[in-house]
Image (cartoon, grey):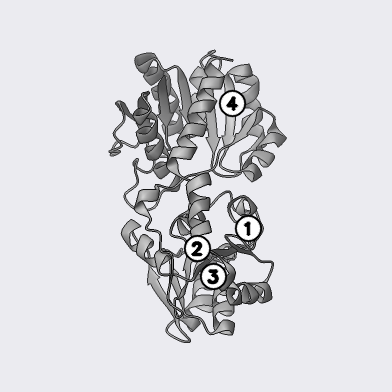
Amino acid sequence: MRILLTADPELPVPPQLYGGIERIVDLLVTGLQSRGNIVGLVAHPESTSNASKFFPWWGRQSQNKFDALKNTIRLRSVVQQFQPDIIHSFSRILYLFGVLQSPLPKVMSYQRDPSSRTTNWGSKLAKNSLTFTGCSDYICRVGRNGGGVWHPIHNCVELDKYTFQPTVGSNAPLVFLSRVEQIKGAHTAIAAARKTGRRLIIAGNHSNNSESEKYWLEEIVPHLGRNGIEYIGTVNDAQKNELLGQAAAMIVPIEWEEPFGIVFAEALACGTPVISCPRGALPEIVRHGVDGYLVQNQEEAVSAIEQLANINRHVCRQRAEQCFSASVIVEQYEKLYQRLLFK
């Protein structure tokens, strides 16, 4: 198959630091080509992904109307040049406007809550040529409110980058790895760690906007350097692997509907149990009492920490291998392409 993939124009594929969608696209490029497909990529000009054919976007900002128009024109010209059998967009649905009414099969993937208005008009213009995927059942349930055909295909991790650690010491720390903001629950992680007397390492960036800065200064900073609570800032892939591998658990007690959260699958790949909340896609990632615990409040988080010895780290790794490995997810996308091409 000749497959044309698109990513948002802001970050290169793969990303230099953070960029979950861009990592997924890069894994798809590599995995699909290893299975004998020819893959074209439309992405940020500095992308280094080893696609068969690369096409840089003309516009660099998704929210800029002029750039959106340029990228819509750009994608139509790329389709004429590359002649794909199928288009798979991880970028804006608006960029597909120039080819929506073509019978060419198209897949639009969402990593966040989709807009019912845009998915509705996309479905109507494309008729039967446009199919949607969501990174979780949760995203697909939201998306179906706008109509269209939806398939859940989870995000994936490159297992080779995550070292399975079958055991950790009795003094192993808890790890919070995410953006340090209220919806990610860093304050709850701190409170639970303090109540159980466990060390907590906090890693991730924090925003400087007024609301986030207030949260950081009032809810996080007063605890740093005390009672085993430590902040280490942002981490790269190698540091993330080491940090998660040494952890007794990753604790990110979210307060929002998480679309997926690749870091949860990354923790499982290291054999590290996850403590979070049953919101958004988390019940699809973590089986309560098997791969970690899904808790409703601080008291339940404390109880989960005290029961970590009941979680088998080998089972956590198996969960990542069977459900969230790159090979599994690439195969699911390839089968979807084949169904769309030969239906």
Under mark 1, the amino acid is Trp
In the rendered view, tell whether residue 54 sits above or below residue 81.
Answer: below
Amino acid type for the residue under numbered disc 3: Ala
The residue carrying pointer 1 sits among few (fewer than 14), some (14 to 19) or many (20 or more) residues within 10 Å by Cα, namely: some
- Of tags 2 and 1, the one toward the viewer is 2
Q: How far is mark 2 from mark 3, CA to CA?
A: 24 Å
Decide which of tag 4 and tag 2 comes sooner along the chain. 4
Q: Quadrant of residue 127?
A: top right
Label 3: element kind: helix
- In three-dimensional space, the C-alpha distance between marks 3 and 4, rounded to whole angstroms, equals 37 Å
Q: How many marks?
A: 4
Between the residue at mark 1 and the residue at mark 3, the CA separation in whole angstroms equals: 13 Å
Circle 1 residue = 256
| Marks 1 and 3, the one that precedes in the sequence | 3
Q: Which image quarter holds the C terminus?
A: top right
Residue 230, horizontal then vertical, whole percent: 42, 78
Between 277 and 73, the one lying in front of the other is 277
Task: Report the residue at 69% width, 29% height from top.
Answer: 147
Q: Secondary structure at mark 1?
A: loop
User: x, y (%) of residue 188?
Assistant: 59, 73
- Frontmost residue, 190 versus 1: 1
Q: Earlier in the sequence, mark 1 or mark 4?
A: 4
Q: Earlier in the sequence, mark 3 or mark 4?
A: 4
Residue position for label 2: 313
Disc 4 target residue: 131
Q: Residues within 10 Å of mark 3 (few under 14, many from 20)?
A: many
Image location (x, y in percent) of residue 157 = 43, 48
Determine whether the residue tagged by mark 2 lies in a helix, strand or loop: helix
**Residue identified by numbered label 3:** 186
